[in-house]
Amino acid sequence: MKTATATTATATTATATTAAVKGPASYFPSIEKKYGRPIEEWKDLIRTSPLTKHMELVAWLKTEHGLGHGHANALVAHTLAEKAA
């Protein structure tokens, strides 16, 4: 029984850690996997862009870099929120 309890506790901890990532950052692993660039590289592109409005940046990432709307939106939302903080 102790082995089963330890396994359950480990599984619960792993699930709790995974579940802690919410909001735009929850898209980051799939963005890196799909587009092959680290998140910091995408954020640097957004920060150095002459565009400043959320939807302008989303449209730019979609047209110039081929990102899907959800991925582009998540990157822009997270980057602009850091800038505002």
Image (spheres, grey):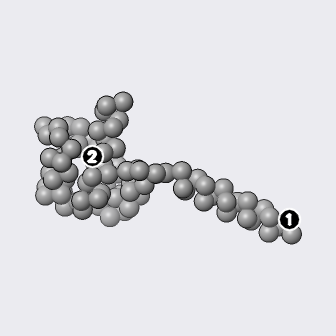
Callout 2: SS: helix
> Relative to residue 66, is residue 11 drawn left or right?
right
Q: Callout 2, which amino acid?
A: Val
Which quadrant would the N terminus be assigned to in this image? bottom right
* Pointers 2 and 1 in contact (C-beta within 8 Å): no
First-in-chain label (2 vs 1) = 1
Picture disc at residue 84: none
Query: From this viewpoint, is residue 41 visible?
Result: no
Residue lying furthest top: 85
Mark 1 Cα shell of 10 Å, populated few (<14), some (14-19), many (≥20): few
Q: Residue at x 80, y 64 (%)?
A: 5
Q: Residue at x 27, y 52 (%)?
A: 73
Which quadrant would the C terminus be assigned to in this image? top left
Query: Relative to 57, is 8 above or below?
Result: below
- Give the x, y percent position of residue 82: 35, 35
Q: Callout 1, which amino acid?
A: Lys
Callout 1: SS: helix
Q: Residue at x 58, y 53 (%)?
A: 17
- Give the x, y percent position of residue 44: 27, 41
- Give the x, y percent position of residue 61: 19, 53
Picture disc at residue 76: 2
Residue denoted by label 1: 2
